[in-house]
Image: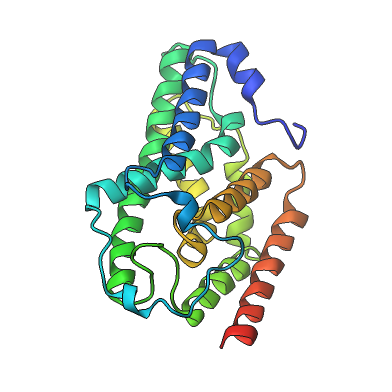
Amino acid sequence: MTPIDLGIARMLRNAPVVGSGVIAVTLACWMFFFAGAGTGMNVWKMSVPGLPPISGQAKMMASTTGIGMTSMTFMWWTMMLAMMMPGALSHLPSHGTERLPAVENTIGFWICYACVWLGFSIVAAAFQYRLVDAGLLHAMNMWSTNTWFSAALLAIAGFYQFTGFKARSLATCREMPSGTSPFRSGLTYGLNCLASSLPLMLLLFAGGVMNVFWVALLTGVVTLEKALPNPKPFRIAVGAASLGASAVLLITRH
């Protein structure tokens, strides 16, 4: 697999109908995100390159977004699918098994994979409300209002990149799933990818949950980790960059 091989050609060749459907769902999730993901907000007005400013946000911290839990969860879920699917396309099964043809095998796998991210999205949405109530997250812009909180998220993500658990979960997430049951394979693969990417996804609370620049950056990171022939140097570089950003943030803003 080359660094730019996302498995699109293989999927369309082996399972053209389902492959086209999965790609269409991924593109639809991106379009939904850019349209505000059902929040009624303009994502570009919630987006800044780099880390958002901390000062001048106190008066907004205690308010609520006015977005219900269901809508917030759906926003998180579609955003996670948009971000994670580009790196997962090359690992989705596009072949049949002894019991299931290719179409049913791919659909069953994808549904269970998507359900893992739905579970994460429920927790993330609930956590977001708690952060707003605690004054750590801007209710409207959805980014951190606290230097220490942002620095902690960056440090955690950075340290995690150096751990053996990260290396093992990423290695499993880079492998083609095996097993006779697409449901079990999809669930296992989704959990491994969640374990590999969780601290990186939490950086959305620092940079902005709907900040286009951060969403694009993290999408690129998790996709390259799965697509590069040897992800270790890149994984280490991302960890060092996160730790460096945490230190710079504390030095310049505290």
Q: From the viewer's side, name the closer residue of 201 and 204.
A: 204
Q: Write down the quadrant of residue 253 in the picture.
A: bottom right
> Is residue 92 shown above or below 165?
above
Q: Quadrant of the C terminus?
A: bottom right
> Is residue 184 shown above or below 171?
above
Query: Residue 220: horizontal and vertical position, in percent?
Result: 64, 47
Query: Residue 190: horizontal and vertical position, in percent?
Result: 46, 42
Does residue 189 show up?
no
Q: Is residue 162 left or right of residue 105?
A: right
Q: How is the image coloured?
A: rainbow
Q: Is residue 196 left or right of residue 130?
A: right
Residue at position x 57%, y 70% from top? 154
Q: Write down the quadrant of residue 91 in the picture.
A: top right
Q: From the viewer's side, name the closer residue of 57 and 154.
A: 57
Q: From the viewer's side, name the closer residue of 2 and 60.
A: 60
> Is residue 71 shown above or below 96?
below
Query: Residue 170: horizontal and vertical position, in percent?
Result: 61, 49
Residue at position x 33%, y 70% from top? 131
Does residue 185 show up?
yes
Q: Number of labelled discs?
A: 0
Query: Residue 15: horizontal and vertical position, in percent?
Result: 54, 13
